[in-house]
Amino acid sequence: MKLELRGITKKFGAFTANDRIDLVVEPGQIHCLLGENGAGKSTLMNVLYGLYQADGGEILLDDEVQQFAGPGDAMRAGIGMVHQHFMLVPVFTVAENVILGHEQAGFAGVLKMKEARARVREISARFGFDVDPDARVGDLPVGVQQRVEIIKALSQDARVLVFDEPTAVLTPQETDELMAIMQQLRAEGRSIVFITHKLREVREVADAITVIRLGKIVGEADPTASNAELAALMVGRSVDLTVHKEPAKPGNEVLKISGLTVLDENGLKVVNDVSFSLRQGEILAIAGVQGNGQTELTEALLGLQNKVSGSITLNGSEILGSSVRSILDAGVGFVPEDRNRDGLIAEFTIAENLMLDRSTGAPFVKAGNVQREFRDAFATEKRTEFDIRSGSITSFASELSGGNQQKVVLARELSRDLALFVAAQPTRGIDVGSIEFVHKRMVATRDAGVPVIVVSTELDEVVALADRIAVMYRGEIVGIVPANTPREVLGLMMAGERHAEATDASAEVTA
């Protein structure tokens, strides 16, 4: 089925998310829609799927104009969507999820579950999915849950499939399996729109590439284009995608974590007996699929978790049980994984956000009064140093792009005397130009002798930045390995396999 979008425009108030976008996807084609988070890719696909109503333009399938009042109309027309955040009910079985919204009932209103199970088995067998129709979705691994989403779309005989950032929660092996599935779907003649910002994946499967920036189509690219060429299209300038760093020169031990265990509100272990150490001048990257205890580990380091046991020492002093204020004053810098919720106050200016964790004393506060002249001079200096692109230091954080918001957080945290720097998902939702800047600052921090912990679900980022890599799975560290460990090995570890060459928790970096 041929898909064509003509002049699609979608506005949210005064903000134009999609500006007269034209796109053609041929039958049997994987068409990659490439762009940074916030570029307008998902909005465009939500218009296609009937979740949003366009303010202008039209959708055509096999040259016929379509009118979708909602997702049901889109599905009936042959469009299926695999969402970035799965649309599954965890307590339902696979078969129940597949028929949800398309239930067929027999005598006395009894659901035709036998037919639903048979449909799941048929699709599963055709694509080698190995999915049990009676399995409870909440008990399935993330990669299998994604296959359930694909089965849902195929059960309605979707001829156009939209994959919206489908690899965000997958291990490398699961990503490779998904690429193979997409190629199989293409071979059947289905049209596929693949939304992503990961250049490696684009080059692996794309038949055609369209780049979107700030809500507009800015160019088409050939799948043979280099990463640098694609990145330049995405951000409008040339970008150095290589992380340049010298071998680590680790010094004295700064951080030592022993037997760290964190319980959630139900008393379940979300971090289980974690131990490792960190020295001056090295970057330890913590890898793993999202939801394996990384968030709780970093929050425990900052005193943000309540049910914690074990030991955390910083320069020989125990900080477990200390207040967040005390830990910050001890020299811990922290970039949280959700900058909007935990890193910034949207209604505050850049200048106000830059002094958030230093608002209790000199030099920003004196006798209970903010020293505005000092604060503004400091903000002006950091705005230049960290290339924060805004109207002025009085611009509100809410007015900044994701990359510039992240630069404000970095500027605040890296402008203190640090003993340890912790960055969780430091490049999530920012453009490749900002990623380049963030990586340079993190390496510079390491080279200044400050130990750095980076938590990232982006394996390319982990490998590029790390001196050592700790892999977490279900709250445990399954191994700590050198940065040159093959991706395939890291992928197996992210799925829970302990690797024979993994070092112990106190392993040191070698140059």
Image (tube, helix red, strand yellow):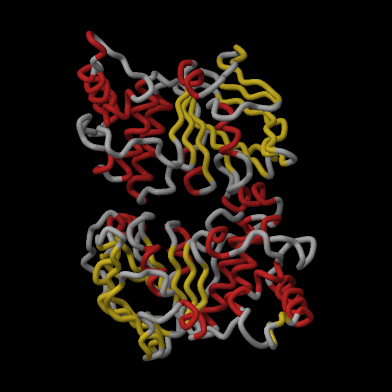
Q: Is residue 176 in view?
A: yes
Q: Is residue 370 left or right of residue 324?
A: right
Q: In the rendering, at what x and y percent does residue 421 appear?
A: 49, 76
Q: x%, y% of residue 219?
A: 68, 39
Q: Is residue 2 left or right of residue 136?
A: right
Quadrant the C terminus occupies: bottom left
Residue at the far top in the pictured view: 107
| Residue found 28% across the figure and 27% down from its top | 96
**Left or right: 29 as drawn, with respect to 436:** left
Residue that appears at 30% across and 81% down: 311
Q: Which residue occupies 79% across, 65% down?
A: 392
Look at the picture and state if 16 lies above or below 116: below
In front of the other: 74 or 231: 74
Q: Give the x, y percent position of residue 67.
A: 59, 16
Query: Is 410 rendered above or below residue 42?
Result: below
The residue lying at 70 percent from left, 40 percent from top is 218
On the image, which quarter does residue 406 sit in? bottom right
Return the x and y of residue 305 as percentages of the image width and height.
37, 69
